Image: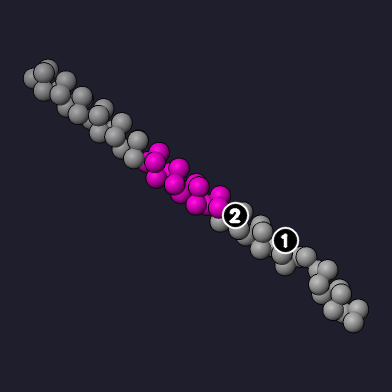
Amino acid sequence: MQKMRAFIKNSKGATAIEYGLIAALIAVAAIAAMGTLGNQLNTTFNGVSTKMSSNNDKLK
């Protein structure tokens, strides 16, 4: 009976699962943020490239 009580009181497995879930949520949030940031950077660099080529054509 004492072994059953000790098994029920053991929370190491639950803690590991909780840490795993927290890590997974952080990873999902990081991936979403990087995707949004990547799209914004792509738009910015395309705009800069367009303006540079436009100015280069004016210099010719």
Q: Residue at x 50, y 52 (%)?
A: 28
Which of 19/38 is in front? Answer: 19
Q: Is residue 11 left or right of residue 30?
A: right
The reply to whether the magenta stretch includes residue 35 is yes
For residue 37, which quarter of the picture? top left
Question: Which secondary structure dominates the residues rendered in magenta?
Answer: helix
Which of 46/52 is in front? Answer: 46
Position of 33 relative to 43 (above/below): below
Image quadrant in which the N terminus is located: bottom right
Position of 59 relative to 37 (above/below): above
Check the image and name the residue furthest to the right: 2
Q: Residue at x 35, y 35 (%)?
A: 40
For residue 45, which quarter of the picture? top left
Residue span colored magenta? 25-38
Q: In this view, does 13 lie to the left or right of 59?
A: right
**Which amino acid, mark 1?**
Thr
Which of 41/56 is in front? Answer: 41
**Which amino acid, mark 2?**
Ala
Q: In this view, does 7 lie to the left or right of 17?
A: right
- Secondary structure, mark 1, is helix
Query: Disc 2 marks which residue?
Result: 23
